[in-house]
Image (cartoon, rainbow, N blue to C red):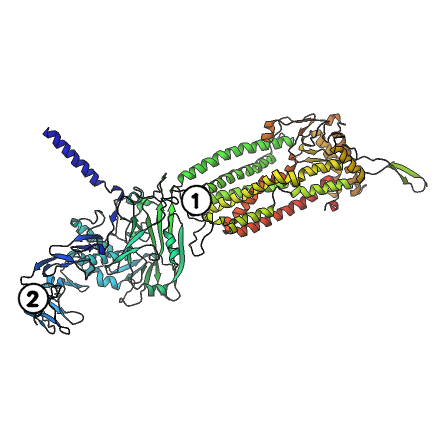
Amino acid sequence: MATGTLRDFMYGLFVIFLLKLNIFSCQQFSIAFQQPSDCRGENYFDISSLSCLKCGPNQISSNVKSGLTCECKTGFRVLVSNGASITCQQCRDANQGVTQDGYGCIQCPGSVSENGKCQCPKGNVLVERDGNGNLLNEARCEACSATEPSFSEPDTTGSRCVRCEDSFINSSQSCVCGTSNILAGGMCFSPNILPTSVASSVTYSQLALFVPSAWFSNFMYSSSAACLLFSNRTACQALGNMCVLNMHSFSSITNDACGLYNTIYRATAAQGSSQDISYWRSNLPWLYYGEQSGLASRILQTEPLPVGFSFKGAQKNTNIELLAAVYSMRGDFLRWESVSGGNLQLCPDTPARQQSAFTFGTAYKQTCVLSVSDLLIGYPEPVFYDVFLVIQSAQETRRLLAVPLLNVNQQFNGQFINQGSNMNNWYLTRRLMLVDTLSGREKSLSSTPRVIRVASNIKIGFKLVPNTQKGQVYPPLLTVDYSDILITDPSTQTVTVSFSLEYTMDQNEARIKTDIALGVLGGVAVVHSLLKTASWKRRIASPLIDLQTILKFLLFYAGDLANVFFIITVGTGLYWLIFFKAQQFVSMLLPLAAQEDRFVVYVGCAFALKTVQFLHKVFVQLSVDIFFIDWERPRGKASKHVDGSGEGKSQASPVSIWRTYFVANEWNEIQTFRKISPTFQVMAVLFCLEVVGFSSLALRDPSSNLRRSPEAYTPPYSLILRYGLASALWLSIGLIQMIFFTVFHERFIEDKIRQFVDLCSISNISVLLLSHRCFGYYIHGRSVHGHADTNMDEMNMNLKREADNLCGQRGLLPNSDTQTFQISITNRLRAQYDRILEPLTRRNGPSRLMDATASSCEQSTKAYHTMNRFLGSVIDHAHREMDYIVKDKLLFERLVGMEFIEPLDKSIFYNDDSHSFADVLFYGNEAVLLIFDTLFFCVVDMGSQNFILAAVLTYLQQLIFRLIRNGIGRRNLATKTLVDKRFLI
């Protein structure tokens, strides 16, 4: 039983040990936040460990030093002092007071003050030692007198006698540093503590310049010796500052600032670490994280912060709170400072704008140009910052997480080690400064510096934990890049500086998904393009695969691949726009500007390929064959006088051509008619973006507000969000217009396509359209009344009879209303069509092929009447060898856009109630035009970052292409229909 009890007891101790060991495992680099005001009574604030430590026996915190050191209690004197610690002893007589230097007890001439020291009447000087420095039996109120054996000396004011510096007494038992000792920085040191010669030059690698520094020459040895020999914390901080001024660079040389720091770091290993952080040596500043390979990745990407960020809701948390321990050049701790304004931002700006930098998710960047002369005046000495991230949670007290520093200028053995992208090769450090105008002074500390160093680029980066749903991020990384400036003319010299916050996440998964979507949809585009090519080959009645076939396939594939890129880019833009702006707990962050290059390439490919498809569509429409079949027949005979005979000859009355001209003009007008209003489209999109304020949604911040205060900081735009927003608005307004046009306008106001079909029926004119050699469209416009060339009364009577169903139907077949057809004609019919137009083709060719016996006008008239009679007879089934059948298209044929039956003996007329002849007009290609306009608008905006310019250029582009389509289309209409273009108004 005793054995079991012992085993249980040991098991309990082991569990407690594990709990103690891992209590802050996720915060291994965090410390409790304390400041000097928290250290009272018997505690003092240790500037090295940034925490409150207990004073020695009979000691209290010194008020004179703001609680940064300890002093003896009232009535106690200093017995022993080595510069780092003291020993106190109580005075034996109650009437005795402690001497002014605190090292002795003396009989007071008068009363003892509240601080336990003798006091004299006003105007007297308290003398506690004789002329030889020996302590008097009783203090006197008289002038101070110092002699060499007293170990005292006048102070700088000459008002009192003080004990000389401890290093002199400890080294030479006098106030004079002996010849065998080393005098440095006003202190006396024993020889052989450190190398007697130190490398006091500062390296400016960008200028390939080594400048001997007056500050380093005066204080480097004394600071390092006092730090090593006496553990003087201020001296240690001063030495660390000089290492920071040398860019944390180190090598095999041990007598430069960083070399001396590392020597002391290794020599004081027995002193232990501060705050249980192994890289933070007691009494030394924390400058390095270590030299192990891959340490940077373990620090930055192993343990996430214990708190998460949220953009919305009751648990909204977007505040980034940073604190900095601020030190002077001499190593004095100045204060704790909140990094919330312009303390790390050299660019002048309003406090509200500078505070915006610390709103999580807001891409912040401020860049400005500063005058070197202003920097020399405003920063006479550098100030140093140890930056911490404040971690505040409900379960824990306020803690500070050390923010690691990546110094881009840091070197190891002359090689830059932090300029690559491989995190495993980085050396992380601590402590930074903004402007150094001190270390570049060569002759004296008051001389003008030869070189100054400025933090030209400071960046704080956060990386999101992969697959997080609670807004967890890894510890931030502070990256600083310094610029070396050789002083020539400070009044004219300038330096560009910037401060930014950057938020990243792993984009590999999104990139892989995009590549998969592109591959799958690209494969579908290939199949679809092959089907289009096969359909085109059948419609031109050409079984051979030649160069023209390959070119046609590439043109079809360009259009389909453009749609693939368009779908992917619009989907990507909307995905980031919706999910980034609407998320509550942060689970995704926008790609950086450099990561958007791939997306921009996709948009460029979509635009280029869509342009090829658009131009191909326009070219096909401008080369379509068209003819107007006039069914009107003469209704009587007219007499014609014959010259010389004196008699009149009777012949058929001519048929008016004005109906054909009228139909041709209507066709000419609807060639560029669209389902949307381009002007309204441009104005509506511009109104939503600039007036309503939707453009604010494309800013790189989590806010969804459409209105921003002019005084507030405006982050840069995201190209992905800007593209997603612009394309979504353009497509949405376009689709709304199309729905309104189809549902309301065409039904209740005007339907130009159906009105044209009705016009053909009223005019007794049919339209034959051939978009391919053996494929096209037919509009049956033969009047059910037999004649259309009549007066108003008869026309109104005919329309009334048709409205009362007192006549036949308009369709091609009996008892049918179908007037529009897709036609697939035989080679024989097409050959006869070309044969009739051959004289006109020769007319447009070389002059040797023209028929000199007939004028061009007579040839056109003859060809027109011949074609009119021929096509009319074909429609009336007058040619058995060129007959046709009427049927419905199969559903699958409609889906794939291809006819499965090849017209060998008879042409095929497919019923087409959807009026697909509009495919040879802008009206039937609205999707292509809408996507082309969308891409044009977005590409111009991505290049200019200006929605107004993009809208203006898009409108001009639409106007230009409409004019081109109208002009060349009018010429093609006149050529193919044999209608004089002078009648096409």
Count neighbours of disc 1 (C-alpha within 10 A) and say few if under 14, some if 14 to 19, many if 20 or more: many
Q: Residue at x 65, y 44 (%)?
A: 965
Image location (x, y in percent) of residue 225: 18, 58
Q: Is residue 403 visible?
A: no
Query: Dividing the picture into quarters, in which one does residue 627 lie?
Result: top right
Spot occupied by residue 235 in the image (x, y as percentages of width and height): 20, 58
Query: Which amino acid type corresponds to the residue marked 2 in the rendered image?
Result: Ile
Q: Quadrant of the N terminus?
A: top left
Q: Position of residue 193 (x, y in %)?
A: 15, 57
Using the image, tell me which numbered label, if any, was put on residue 106. 2
Q: Which mark is residue 700?
A: none
Kindly state the secondary structure of the residue where label 2 is placed: strand
Residue 890 appears in the rendering? yes
The answer to whether residue 267 is left or right of residue 722 is left
Instruction: Report the amino acid beneath label 1.
Output: Lys
507 horizontally vs 885: left or right: left
Kind of element beneath mark 1: helix
Q: How many marks?
A: 2
Q: CA distance from mark 1 to mark 2?
A: 76 Å
Q: In the depicted view, which residue is nearer to us: 808 or 233? A: 808
Front in this rendered view, residue 770 or 348: 348
Decide: few, some or many residues near mark 2? Use Cα within 10 Å; few <14, some 14-19, many ≥20. many
Left or right of 890? Residue 526 is: left
In the rendered image, which residue does mark 1 sit on? 581
| Image position of 347 with respect to 281: above or below | below
| Relative horizontal placement of residue 251, taking residue 752 as reference (left or right) | left
Q: Nearer the viewer, residue 363 or 312?
A: 312
